[in-house]
Image (tube, grey):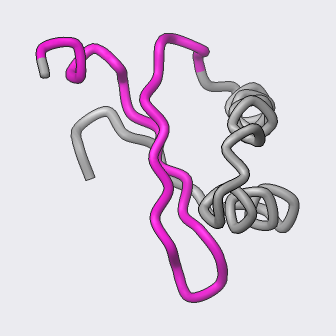
Amino acid sequence: MRQGAIEWEAGAELTALLRRYYRGEAALWGEIQAIVHADLLRQGLPLAPRHLRFRASETGYMVIVEDAEGYASL
């Protein structure tokens, strides 16, 4: 995990959307972002520019949210 990253297990709704997204429903990206945004708010975390990643797990997906600053130089 990169420094400054936050991880949590995706809930059932987000997991279902991610499965559909990875099967080709790219139009779901905005809905996925909205759920992650709401999860960040519920956790009391700042809504600074973020880079989102998802990693498959045994039960669904891990949400990985990193500061976007490190990606600006790539």
- Between 34 and 26, the one lying in front of the other is 26
Image point 27% across, 14% down: which residue?
A: 69
**Number of numbered tags placed on the structure image:** 0
Side (left or right) of 9 relative to 67: right
The residue sitting at the left extreme is 73
* Residue 36 sits in quarter: top right
* Residue 9 sits in quarter: bottom right
Residue 74 appears at what percent x and percent y?
13, 22
Residue 73 appears at what percent x and percent y?
12, 14
Where 60 sits versus 27, above or below? Answer: below
Image point 52% across, 79% down: which residue?
A: 57
Image point 81% across, 66% down: which residue?
A: 16
Where 15 sits versus 35, above or below? Answer: below
What span is in magenta?
46-73
Side (left or right) of 69 relative to 54: left
Where 36 sits versus 23, above or below? Answer: above
- Between 20 and 67, the one lying in front of the other is 20
Residue 11 appears at what percent x and percent y?
78, 62
Asked if the stretch drawn in magenta spans residue 3, the answer is no
Asked if the stretch drawn in magenta spans residue 56, the answer is yes
